[in-house]
Image: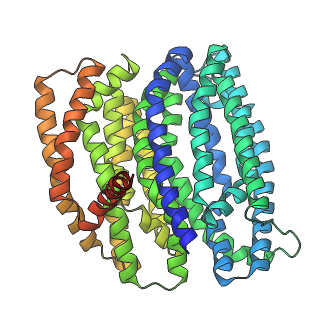
Amino acid sequence: MNNSKSQLKSGVVLSYINLIIGNVIPLIYTPMMLSLLGQSEYGLYTLANTIVGYLSLLSFGMGSAIVRYITKYKVSGDKEKERQMFGLFTFLFTVLAVIVFVLGIILSFNVHLFYSNTLNASELQTMRILIILCTINSAVTFLFTTYLSMIMIYERYVFRQILNIFTTVAMPCVNIIVLYMGLASVGMVVSSTVLNILVSVASVIYCHRSLHIKPKFKGMPFGELREIFGFCFFVFLGSVVDMLFWSTDKIIIGAVIGTVAVAVYNVGATFNTIVTSISTTISSILTPKVTNMVFSSENTKVLTDFFIKVGRLQYLVVSLVVSGFIVFGRQFIHLWVGDGYNEAYFVALLTLLPVVVPLIQNTGLSIVMAQNKHKFRSIVYLIIAIVNVLTTAIAVNYWGIIGAAACSAASYIIGQGFIMNWYYWKKTGIDIPMFWKNIIKMSLAPVIMITAGIIICHYVELESWILLLMGIAIYLICYIPIVWFTGMNKYEKNIIITPVKNVFNRIRRK
């Protein structure tokens, strides 16, 4: 138990180290990459990754099923069943990897059917190559999915986060090297694939030598496939929805406007990805814990307290980042990537603000999946996502990328905001009114700072990195004491106070 708690704490610390590294490196890497690639080539690279991303849907939601069904046997102590279930999922993902590869090859040779109007012959040829390479990368991911999941199931967060940090640091470094060698987007995808293979092999070795667990293919429980697929079907619908929300926009924009517009849209949507990673850092680590709580028959009061505790921690971080972006985002994007990306700020706001609610409630998703109550969520999201795609296809012709982002924002507010809060409250038993009372009390600091920041920035132009960084520093200096005295409870303050006290105590002992 103590080792598990130590792993959890160390995993959280390492995950945030990875998060900081992953958000600092792009400040240097992205402008260099855009300069070396060019706006059009970057749009092409983004488009190819987005297209192949749809092949990830072929996992049919089984990534979540791995955690649920293997954890079930791990908790019960049935080692034999656990290994057989490990073998079953390994077998299934191997089959899916082959299917992904075949479909990716077919897709690469038919890309002209969709993009011949917006891409020239040279761009179409590059797109074919990129799709083939991205397909190989995706197939590799499928092959080793179960091993990476086993590391999380056994709560070996330290090793998993070390792998993540390695990838976070190595990826941009290698990409810059291949770009300077003139290998462009093709080189970037090749380097990504090589790193993916290295991390995957490392996970296999760790499972075999440190966890001492290997998949057992004899006696695989094929009889449970019906239940597994029943569980996975609605997780799969959720994955379809995510793709429809965040990937289809780019595909429609690429087909209607072109690769340059895709590049601008993707720069704006990047901030959505950054804030999402900040929030899900905690919840992804806690998914096995939530699953264990549900299988251990924890009552709804315990789950509500856990939901609110994690949600408050996520809101402290997300509200700081989002409020800061609202104030400084426009100047930051201009200094970061230069001219030609003015619309990226509005795309960022429209895709960022609506996801704040699900980002501080994503523990709820882990709870409903562990309870096998995610059917309603998946159906509602699918309907809203289809409406989003249809409205985006119309709006992009009139309002360009801003129209596409606005359609996604409206759909997300309805589905993730209103409908899912009702469902968590009425069907899952989580005390949503109590959750929002907590969040409203914590919102004084961001409201004050956004209002003051917008007014000040209206009169003060932050035209250089030095001025911008000074503005952000002043913002933090003002924000932290306000949120400390008006938004944080004793538990949250102790998270900061305790490590500081420990450091001072060690200094005194010396």
Seen at 29% across and 44% down, the residue is: 322
Q: Position of residue 339 (x, y in %)?
A: 36, 16
Q: Is residue 464 left or right of residue 396?
A: left
Question: Closest to the observer: 13 or 152?
Answer: 13
Number of numbered discs: 0
Query: At x 52% / y 23%, what residue is drawn?
Result: 259
Q: Is residue 467 above or below residue 348?
A: above
**Which colour scheme appears in the figure?**
rainbow
Q: Is residue 411 above or below residue 260?
A: below
Is residue 396 visible in the rendered image? The answer is yes
Q: What residue sits 53% from the left and 59% below the top?
A: 238
User: In front here: 351 or 498?
Assistant: 498
Image quadrant where one finds the N terminus: bottom right
Question: Most extreme residue toward the right, as rendered?
Answer: 218
- Residue 214 vs residue 49: left or right? right
Residue that appears at 48% across and 61% down: 9
329 sits to left or right of 471: right
Q: Is residue 151 above or below residue 336?
A: below
Residue 491: x, y in percent?
Answer: 29, 67
Q: Position of residue 404 (x, y in %)?
A: 39, 38
Picture quadrant of residue 225: bottom right
Q: Is residue 266 visible?
A: no
| In the displayed structure image, the side of residue 309 where residue 162 appears, left or right | right
Most foreground residue, 85 or 375: 85
Camera-side residue: 309 or 326? 309
Q: Position of residue 134 (x, y in %)?
A: 69, 36
